[in-house]
Amino acid sequence: MALVGFVLAEPTTAQVQAAAEYTVLKDAPVVAAAIAGRCRYLVTFDRKHLLDPPAVSARSGLLIVTPDIVVLAIQSANETDGERPGE
């Protein structure tokens, strides 16, 4: 399942400050860590601060989605690879 990976990313102060330019301060470390960790997806339920403002996704380069979108992506990748759930 190459789609799912985990990395411990520690963004620099400069990266957090850069993220704070286009998102609320409380979310800047999360966005900066996702960027530093070279994540494709940032998974959240936070519509007000992360999902709905288009600038956050556009400026961060992250696909900011709800968990159901990632589950569908994993299922689709598994079907393409011929895997069945639970394998």
Image (cartoon, rainbow, N blue to C red):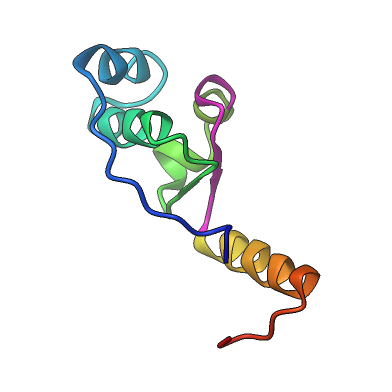
Q: Is residue 13 above or below residue 52?
A: above
Question: Residue visible at 71% across and 65% down?
Answer: 77
Depth order, front residue of 6/18: 6
Q: Is residue 87 above or below residue 77?
A: below
Depth order, front residue of 10/43: 10
Residue 19, quarter of picture:
top left
In the drawing, does residue 40 fall left or right of residue 38? Answer: right
In the drawing, does residue 11 fall left or right of residue 86? Answer: left
Q: Quadrant of the N terminus?
A: bottom right
Coordinates of residue 17 in the picture (x, y in percent): 27, 14
Residue 81, quarter of picture:
bottom right
Depth order, front residue of 19/79: 79
Question: Residue visible at 77% across and 78% down?
Answer: 82
Q: Is residue 62 above or below residue 73?
A: above
Question: Residue visible at 32% across and 34% down?
Answer: 33
Coordinates of residue 53 in the picture (x, y in percent): 52, 31
Coordinates of residue 7 in the picture (x, y in percent): 34, 47
Magenta stretch in the rendered image: 58-66
Coordinates of residue 55 in the picture (x, y in percent): 54, 23
Question: Residue visible at 31% across and 37% down?
Answer: 30
Q: Quadrant of the C terminus?
A: bottom right
In the drawing, does residue 63 fall left or right of residue 11? Answer: right
> Is 40 included in the stretch rendered in magenta?
no
